[in-house]
Each structure stands twice: as structure tokens, then as C-alpha cells.
Image (tube, helix red, strand yellow):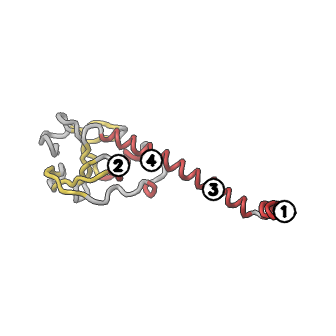
Amino acid sequence: MKCPRCKLDLTTTERYKLKVNQCPSCHGMWFEQAELGELEDEVFDFGDRWKGSLFIDSTVTADQCPECSAQLQKFQYRFYDLQMEVCPNQHGYWLEADEDTRVLELMKREEADLRRKLLAEDKWAATLRHMRSGSFFSRLRDKFTK
């Protein structure tokens, strides 16, 4: 496989417990289709349904897929300020040097935000259950009828 930018042969390297193909010159990386999800799962424990949309819209670039030579499409990763490229034939993703580290940072933040949200929802549900309980309404009624 060739680098979409430098046209050099990609070499296999290990990044965050994954074997990916990397360019020896620009250090860009080719993640096969499932590998991006595996990378995210290194720090995100809630499963795919909580990750949100990977991308909505994309634009064609001049770069070619290392596997099928189709023109890669640039997209905004999960609505963050991070652009990467995807093969329209679903072979994989092209990430610039160290963008895998940025993906991990973004997913860590996403997980922390989701934990906070779910905890707040649980506390609110408990408060509503308490307010709907007979003892709460009895005490409230007693305050206004005395």
C-alpha cells in the first residue's frame, strides 16, 4: 500500500495496541474500517450507540485510498475540530500524524461528559421518585393545611 500523500510504501507499526500502516515520511496512518472503532474503544467504554455519528457530510479530496485507489473523502470527525479522510468503499480511514492521539483525547472527553450526563439523569430521576412518593406529598400537604 502507498501513502495517499507521499506515495511511499506504508510500513506496519503498532499504535495504541493496534497494528496500522504508517508512512515513514509524513507519519500519516491508514486505519482499516474496524480499527478506528477499536482505537476509540481503548478509552470509551459505553459502546458504539453512545459515540454518536462518525460523520454526516464529506467532500472529495485528491488523495487516493491505499487499498482501492478511490478518491478519499474528507469529513469532520464526530463534529469535533478534527478532519480526517475516509474511503468511500469503506476500506478505512487516513489520519495525519498523531491524529490517533487526538481521537483518544476526544473520546476520553466524550466518555467523561457522558458519565456526568448519565449521573445527573439518575439523580434527577431519584429526586422525581422521591417527590412523587406518598410521604413527600403528605409532608407538603401538611405544610399548607396547618
> Front-most of 3 and 132?
132
Q: Nearer the viewer, mark 3 or mark 1?
A: 1
Q: Secondary structure at mark 1?
A: helix
Mark 4 = which residue? 110
Q: Reading the chain from its start, which is encountered first: label 4 or label 3?
A: 4
Q: CA distance from mark 3 to mark 1?
A: 24 Å
> For the residue marked with disc 4, what is the amino acid?
Glu
Q: Nearer the viewer, mark 2 or mark 1?
A: 1
Q: Nearer the viewer, mark 4 or mark 3?
A: 3
Image x and y of residue 132, in percent = 72, 64
Residue 71, picture quadrant:
bottom left
Q: Which residue lies at the image location 61% right of the left edge and 54% below the top edge?
A: 122
Mark 3 = which residue? 124
Q: Which mark is residue 80?
A: 2
Q: Which residue lies at the image location 42% right of the left edge and 47% below the top edge?
A: 41
Q: Reading the chain from its start, which is encountered first: label 3 or label 2?
A: 2
**Mark 4 nearby-residue class (10 Å; few <14, some 14–19, many ≥20):** some
Q: CA distance from mark 4 to mark 1?
A: 45 Å
Image x and y of residue 109, in percent = 44, 43
**Mark 2 nearby-residue class (10 Å; few <14, some 14–19, many ≥20):** few
Q: Nearer the viewer, mark 4 or mark 1?
A: 1
**Mark 3 nearby-residue class (10 Å; few <14, some 14–19, many ≥20):** few
Q: Reading the chain from its start, which is encountered first: label 3 or label 1?
A: 3
Whether residue 58 is situated above or below residue 30 in the rendered picture? below
Q: Are marks 2 and 1 in contact (CB under 8 Å)?
A: no
Q: Which residue lies at the image location 27% right of the left edge and 59% below the top edge?
A: 57
